[in-house]
Image (cartoon, helix red, strand yellow):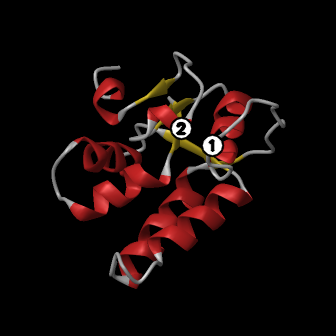
C-alpha cells in the first residue's frame, strides 16, 4: 500500500512510543507500507525534525530519513493548481495524487477534502 506521510505524523511518532502515528512508522519498518516522497518532502522532513524546539536525537532523525529513502519511492510529482494555506503542504498532496497513494496527516484541514487524505486514526483500519 502506497502512502505519503505528512511531517506532523512523524513528529507525533517520535514524541510517543505508542499511538497511531508510531504504529504507522512501525508498519513502514515492517515493509507493510511503501512511502512515496520527493525532494521537497525530504527537505521538509529534514528541516522540521531538526528544529531545536523538538530536541529530537540526530540518530533518530537520520534513522527515519534513511528508512524513508531505503524503503520508499522517490516520485516526480505532477503540479496541481489547488490552493493551499500552507504552501509546504502542496508537495505532500502532489506526490500522493501522482503516486495514487494515501496521504496521512494530522492536519486534514490544510488539504482539499479528498477521500485519499486520512488522519492516522482513519488510516489504520485499512
Disc 1 crowd rating (10 Å Cα; few below 14, some 14-19, many 20+) is few
Marks 2 & 1, CB-CB < 8 Å contact = yes
Q: Residue at x 17, y 58 (%)?
A: 17
Q: Which of 1/109 is in front?
A: 109
Disc 2 crowd rating (10 Å Cα; few below 14, some 14-19, many 20+) is some
Percent across and percent down for residue 45 are 54, 64
Q: Which of 102/108 is in front?
A: 108
Q: Is residue 123 above or below residue 94?
A: above
Q: Can you identify the residue that label 2 sits on?
A: 110
Q: Which residue in the rendered view is the most extreme toward the front? A: 85
Percent across and percent down for residue 58 are 41, 83
Q: Can you identify the residue that label 1 sits on?
A: 85
> SS for tag 2?
helix
Q: Is residue 45 left or right of residue 105?
A: right
> SS for tag 1?
loop
Q: CA distance from mark 2 to mark 1?
A: 7 Å
Q: Is residue 76 left or right of residue 126?
A: right
Percent across and percent down for residue 30 are 35, 46
Q: Residue at x 83, y 36 (%)?
A: 78
Q: Which badge, 2 or 1, is on the more N-terminal residue?
A: 1
Amino acid at each position: 500500500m502506497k502512502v505519503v506521510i505528512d511531517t506532523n505524523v512523524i513528529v507525533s511518532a517520535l514524541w510517543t512510543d505508542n499511538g497511531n502515528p508510531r504504529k504507522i512508522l512501525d508498519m513502514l519498518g515492517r515493509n507493510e507500507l511503501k512511502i512515496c516522497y520527493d525532494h521537497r518532502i525530504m527537505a521538509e522532513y529534514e528541516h522540521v525534525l531538526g528544529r531545536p524546539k523538538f530536541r529530537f536525537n540526530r540518530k533518530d532523525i537520520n534513522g527515519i530519513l534513511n528508512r524513508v529513502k531505503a524503503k520508499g519511492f522517490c516520485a516526480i510529482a505532477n503540479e496541481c493548481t489547488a490552493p493551499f494555506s500552507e504552501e509546504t503542504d502542496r508537495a505532500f498532496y502532489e506526490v500522493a495524487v501522482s503516486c495514487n497513494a494515501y496521504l496521512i496527516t494530522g492536519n486534514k484541514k490544510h488539504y482539499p477534502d479528498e477521500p485519499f487524505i486520512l488522519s492516522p486514526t482513519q488510516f489504520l483500519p485499512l
